[in-house]
Image: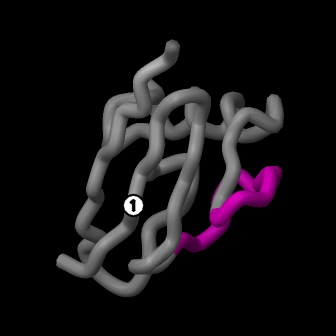
């Protein structure tokens, strides 16, 4: 059984771009690597596959990638 890894990420400012979020939480080594992960269709936002690499994410949204769940909160 795969264990879910839950991460809470406090957004500094109004939003964070998806590829940058993946970098900031340590899933991707760089923003470019984050874009590649998104381009492969591996990331969901609020239960829907997200293909926009620089999608603007705001507090209250949930990002999923494999067994990782990232909940966005206000800072």
The scheme the figure's colours follow is: one colour
Question: Hey, which residue is sitting farthest left in the picture?
Answer: 75
From the viewer's perspective, is residue 1 above or below residue 50? above
Question: Hey, which residue is sitting farthest top in the picture?
Answer: 1
Residue 48 appears left or right of 60: right
Q: What stretch is highlighted in magenta?
A: 46-57
> Residue at left 78%, top 59%?
48
> Residue at left 24%, top 67%?
10
Residue 53 % position (x, y): 70, 52
Residue 71 % position (x, y): 39, 60
* Residue 55 within the magenta-colored segment of the rendering: yes
Q: Which of 55 and 62 is in front in this view?
A: 62
Count of marks placed on residues: 1
- Write down the quadrant of residue 4 in the picture: top left
From the viewer's perspective, is residue 48 above or below residue 43? below
Residue 45 % position (x, y): 65, 60
The secondary structure type at the circle numbered 1 is strand
Residue 6 % position (x, y): 34, 43
The image quadrant where one finds the C terminus is bottom left
* Residue 52 within the magenta-colored segment of the rendering: yes
> Residue at left 80%, top 51%?
49
Residue 28 appears left or right of 49: left
From the viewer's perspective, is residue 72 above or below residue 29? below
- Write down the quadrant of residue 14 in the picture: bottom left
Question: Hey, which residue is sitting farthest front in the picture?
Answer: 1
> Residue at left 42%, top 51%?
70
**Majority secondary structure of magenta residues:** loop
Residue position for label 1: 71
């Amino acid at each position: 059984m795969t264990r879910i890894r839950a991460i809470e990420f406090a957004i500094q400012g109004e939003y964070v771009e998806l590829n940058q979020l993946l970098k900031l939480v340590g899933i991707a080594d760089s923003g470019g690597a984050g874009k590649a992960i998104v381009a492969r269709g591996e990331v969901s936002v609020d239960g829907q596959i997200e293909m926009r690499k620089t999608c603007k994410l705001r507090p209250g949204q949930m990002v999923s990638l494999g067994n990782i769940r990232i909940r966005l909160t206000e800072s």
